Amino acid sequence: QVQLVESGGGLVQPGGSLRLSCAASGFIFNIYAMGWYRQAPGKQRELVGTITIRRSTKYADAVKGRFTISRDNAKNTVYLQMNSLKPEDTAAYYCNALTPGGNSSLFSSWGQGTQVTVSS
């Protein structure tokens, strides 16, 4: 059974930082690219960034230069380091594996997400 457990969210002031974690289980973690997504109230879920099995990363323009994705295959965990946070980064953040060769989420079942609120 696939499980994706996100953690590390919270309330932070603009300009602050947070590090999110996503612990994965139930599938062979190290053969899949992973993605971080976010969903703000009233908006569709959007892809924030991706990391391949070779640790190549790509980011949405809105977060480029501020967010960094990394992975630890020994711990089956993917991380999202978020710096210089802005109020518009407020959202629930999720992770998922990616379909081979694409940027679509692999699993239809999502974790509970972790809420990030950027506010003064």
Image (cartoon, grey):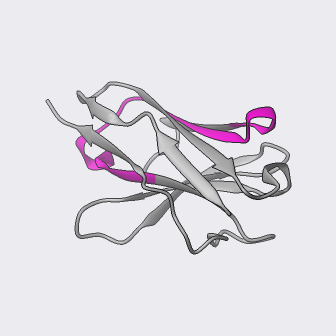
Position of 97 with respect to 36 (left or right) is: right
Q: Position of residue 69 (x, y in %)?
A: 62, 40
In this view, the residue farthest toward the left is 120
Number of marks present in the image shown: 0
Left or right of 2 in this view: 80: left
The percent coordinates of residue 84 (x first, y second) are 37, 29
Residue 8 versus residue 51: which sits nearer the camera?
8
Q: Is residue 19 above or below residue 105?
A: above
Q: Residue at x 29, y 69 (%)?
A: 43
Which quadrant of the structure image shows residue 68? top right
Q: Quadrant of the N terminus?
A: bottom right
Q: Residue at the spot x=27%, y=49% of the render?
A: 88
Most extreme residue toward the front is 1
Which residue is found at the position 62% from the left and 69% from the top?
105
Quadrant of the image containing the C terminus: top left
The residue at the point 68 percent across, 54 percent down is: 34
Query: Does residue 84 belong to the magenta stretch?
Result: yes
Side of 35 relative to 118 (left or right): right
Q: Is residue 81 magenta?
A: yes
Q: Is residue 99 visible?
A: yes
- Please provide the residue range marked out in magenta: 71-93
Residue 28 rendering spot, x and y as whole percentages: 82, 55
Q: Is residue 83 above or below residue 105?
A: above
Q: Nearer the viewer, residue 58 or 2?
A: 2
Residue 61 appears in the figure: no
